[in-house]
Image (tube, rainbow, N blue to C red):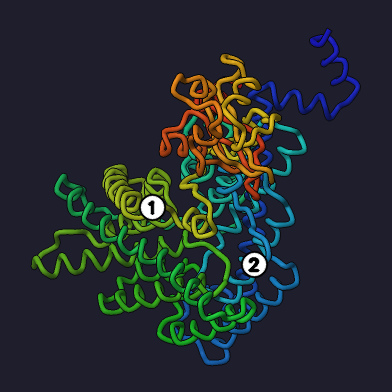
Amino acid sequence: MVTVAAPVLALGNPLAWVRQQFRASEAWFIGLAVIVGCLAGAATVAQGAIARTLQHILFSLPSSTRLSGVPTLGILQLLVLPIGGAVLAGFSQLVRARRRPLVDAVEANALHGGRMTVPDSLVVAAQTLISNGFGASVGLEAAYAQTGGAAASFIGRRLKLRRADLRALVGAGAGGAIAAAFGAPLTGAFYAFEIVIGAYTPSTIAPVAAATVAATLTGQALGSTPYLIAFASGAPVHTIDYAVFAGLGSLCAVLGIVLMRGVALVEAALHRTRVPIWARPMIGGLLLMPLAAISPQVLSAGHAALRLDLAAGATLGFILIVILAKSLASIVSLGFGFRGGLFFASLFLGSLVGHAFADIVNSLSGYVVVDPTGAALVGMAALAVTVVGGPMTMAMLVLEATSDFALTGAVLAAALVASLIARETFGYSFSTWRLHLRGETIKSARDVGWMRTLTAGQMMRRETVATSPEMTVAAFRERFPLGATSRVVLTRGDGTYAGIVVPALAYGADVPLDAPVGTLATATDISVPADADVRRVMQTFEVTESEQLAVVDRDCHVLGLLSEAYVRRRYAEELEKAQRDIFGER
């Protein structure tokens, strides 16, 4: 009867019928991903236009010039920076954004099954637009991905998609936004796989690819100018170049880690000095003024500066100054509360590091060992991998920028070296590092949210028999005959936990009948809180070498009992289910 009733219900409810199609048909789901890609592409174009318009108005820029491409800025133009900090602080206070964590696409997919809220995402986008529009050294890519992912999440939740499908759709939306920004569908697709979804799976390839192509075409149709840097090296890539570029990748990894730690150190210092949150962006804007006076290339994301430096071939001294100033500007901007990302800033910095690396190596050797343009592209990808993650994402970015397969191979080698160093010595990308500072433990967008919901309180067996540790062994034997139960939890008169007793021990021939049963208790100081997730529970079993654990509330009152065998079985079942959701057929 169930199989007959479902289609009848769908026919009577058009929305339910549409939901069934998206849940049951891969073709329909790909069509939905195309819609999401178009929305993400349109939102990316709109946000980029808003930010550029703000910069042109506030900094009085010529129509064909971008902020990071102007040669100098006057004092009145530089004052826009602290004013922007004040505007951002006022907006954040108005929406009370700083009083709650705002979930981005990576966190949503890792912990919340792809669930993002539209109001919070609009706040993130607005904060990023204000920060970038007023010239802070941050990029718009965070707003692009946030908006694309939020649109996908909203649609997917309305259609009541499965958890795995919703995560894939959020990845498609965020990847589509990046694809539209760079005019690079492969880059957007791998961004979705590596950074937002956390895995390459057969079921996600087609919808993600469809979304990124649709987003790119939408951006082109709306007349957007993509970020893609159309510079080709032209120099052949030899086997020895892989070793040279691996060294460049190592250098970029170190700089990327310094950048991320620098932001955290500034935030920690501000917290210790108790500078009010509302005042921090204004102070940050003031600190940006002397850096921008050195060179406006340190402002905004650096799109125009990257094109300018690669095309004009800046001197080594100027490049080193800009690397230092841009790094400080990014640390100050993010550390003092401006919102945005380091995606394009890391691309810009990486290109400068690569160019400087080539100039130094060639100068020391006396002849051209490394092609400066090729090194700039390799450095661009390697530093971005350290900060953002995604070796294939950055390799595809260079491939779509240059159409040079040989150089792309060298880029991938350097990116893998940078990624390895970052994982081994640091362990996080910029987005997951920020989550780590907030107390989260995730290191990628891999779905671990189900572990958060599988808690000790959900798995425990309720303990209803209150047994005092002062009870005599004789009374204990009478209450718990041999074989009646495997474990008994002891509780004091106030209900607090006092240990676990194995009933068989009370039947030992040498046990005095008048002795308190509490003398036979084990794990008297070992328990787990009810909200402990399954991973923490299993770690407790391993460390304590206990087979049973008591579950307690915040006041140490006993709620129930957990066995190691049952917890491991439940973990295996849920893990298998999660893997089926990811790798199984639709």
- Residue 299: where, in percent of width, then height? 49, 75
- Residue 580: where, in percent of width, then height? 55, 23
Residue at the spot of label 1: 385
> 392 or 127: which is nearer to us?
127
2 to the left or right of 239 = right
> 490 or 352: which is nearer to us?
490
The quadrant holding residue 331 is bottom left
Q: Amino acid at mark 1?
A: Val
- Residue 400: where, in percent of width, then height? 42, 47
450 to the left or right of 384 = right
Q: Secondary structure at mark 2?
A: helix
Q: Is residue 279 above or below residue 375?
A: below
Residue 366 visible within the image: yes
Residue at the spot of label 2: 127
Question: Looking at the rendering, in which quadrant would you find the C terminus?
Answer: top right
424 to the left or right of 199 = left
Residue 172 visible within the image: no
| Residue sitting farthest toward the bottom | 75
Within 10 Å of the Cα at label 2, are there few (<14), some (14-19), or many (20+) other Cα atoms? many
**Label 1, label 2: how far apart the Cα atoms are:** 25 Å
Going from the N terminus, do you reach mark 1 or mark 2 first?
Answer: 2
Q: Residue at x 53, y 40 (%)?
A: 197
Q: Amino acid at mark 2?
A: Gln
Q: Residue at x 41, y 69 (%)?
A: 262
Within 10 Å of the Cα at label 1, are there few (<14), some (14-19), or many (20+) other Cα atoms? many
Tally the marks: 2
Q: Is residue 522 above or below residue 247?
A: above
